Amino acid sequence: MAYWHNSQFHHNKHVWLTKRREPSKMGMNRSLAMSSGLRFVPIVFFSVFLIPLPACAETTAKLAPNTVAVLYENITDGPGMGRSVKDTVDMLRDTRAGFIFRGFWQWEPVVESPDQIPAALFSLTSDQRVSPDQVAARLRTTGNYYRSLKKWISSIKREIPELVFCGALPAQHLSRVDYNPVTGRVFMPEETWAMALDPQKWSIVHKGKPMTKADLQERQYGKKGRKYDRHRADAYAPDITNPDFQDLLIGWAQKQIDSGADAIWIDMLQAQGNLMLRMTEDPDHPAVKEAFAAAAKIVDEIHRYGSSNGRPVLAGSWGQSETANAALFATAKLDFVTVTPSNEETANKTLDETRWEETINAIRQIHGNVPVFAFIDWTGNASPLATFSQKLRPDNQKKAIEAFDAAFARMGVTFVYPLHGGDMGKKASRLSFGKLRVYDSLAPEFATFATIKGLAQRKNGNR
């Protein structure tokens, strides 16, 4: 159930898992540079390959260069922080928001409602003294379940019907016990382990020896100082080529679409393809081709599901720009792509515009003329958001927002204003409203909302 993702509201006391593991805890670097080691990394390089225009041109047209994009994760956070639907609508209206990015992020199983929790999911609490009633109560407090999501989206769209709402999903994460909200099936540990990525499916040899399933999984979800034991792992790195995992990931997307989402952003969609490419050093290796083809299938299925329901649905992920393997990255017909400034750029409140112009040009050559969004990403204690929120004073945060907005605009990239959301890291000492580990622009500790509002209104001509 999705309570644990919003556990920042309760000082990281998790109902379902003893310790929540996000990509940041696994060293998954989302910056433009490739990190060392065999971990999933969305890589941005350069290329000269062109692809067709996006499948969802009608909805993409709503994301014009002057569209105001805001990050608000999760839109259902209101009950846990005393913010009503009206309060949220007022924030969106004040900023003239046309696109809510990452409006609902799923990391762990999400259920329909606190009254409809499959009993098998409570095996996630096996190491805790937590009752089903306590879990249900937490969910009601956070609002992090599908019925709540549907209510929040419909209430907001009643007031702002033209708004494009974008949900978000991880392609790199599979809980040890997981759940398909469309079929109602709970996957127990043996079933999820069967969906976990195994390099020996393709007999992959790395550095002169076979890379085993346990070796790879330990690199992704192993705990420092403890021998890897899959039975004690919180989650696994899934195999995107596995049909059962594909159905599960597509089911998560379908449920958000059914709840009102107009777009789905898939984190690290092509990460497995990148990983296999680095391990095999062969773009024609079956492991590489199958991973990129599977990523493309996920995007196609999201498009197909939207069309079958009479409305286009956008699909987005990280932008890629690698020259040598552009054809692989271009197989997924993405409708929009994302990038993030580096830690150093965030600390300096300045972009390396020469590098960025080259990168954005390459991204457009691969992905076509699709919208590109830049947001301040988070990956634990050493992330751009951690730097932004913890190392920059509020006045410098405002300067960084202004600088990024202007610089990205010069490149035709839309900067996503950080309205609400994003984990500032377990070591964060400056907390929103003195208690929340999620960034919030209205919190007195940051107070960046007025700056965002001013920039947004100027972008829309003070309409």
Image: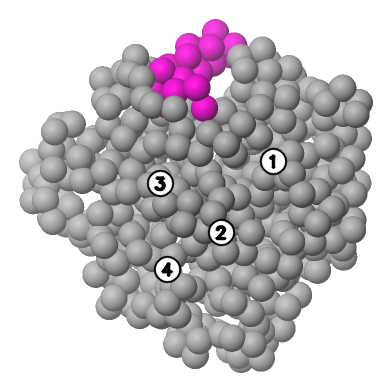
Compared across the picture, whether 231 is left or right of 460 comes to left
Q: Name the residue under label 1.
A: 99
Quarter of the image for the C terminus: give it. Answer: top right
Q: Mark 4 points at which residue?
A: 175
- Give the quadrant of residue 53: top left
Q: Give the range drawn in magenta.
A: 348-370
Label 4 vs 3, first from the N-terminus: 4
Q: Where in the figure is residue 47, as x and y percent of width and height?
A: 35, 17
Which amino acid, mark 1? Phe
Describe residue 30's horizontal placement relative to residue 83 as left or right.
left
Viewer-side residue, 185 vs 25 = 185
Helix, strand or loop status at disc 1: strand
User: Label 2, on which residue?
Assistant: 257
Do labels 1 and 3 touch, CB within 8 Å?
no
Which secondary structure type mostly characterizes the magenta part of the structure?
helix
Q: Which of marks 4 and 3 is in front?
A: 3
Colour scheme: one colour
Q: Which of marks 4 and 2 is in front?
A: 2
Mark 1 or 2, nearer chain start: 1
Q: Say whether disc 3 or disc 2 marks the residue closer to the N-terminus.
A: 2
Residue shown at the point (41%, 80%) measured from the top left: 186
Marked residue nearer the N-terminal end (1 or 3): 1
The image position of residue 316, as x and y in percent, is 50, 41
Q: Is mark 2 on a helix, strand or loop?
A: helix
**Badge 4: few (under 14), some or many (20 or more) residues near its Cα, within 10 Å?**
many
Q: In the rendered structure, are the residues bearing label 4 and label 3 in contact, judged by CB atoms less than 8 Å apart?
A: no
Q: Is residue 454 visible?
A: no
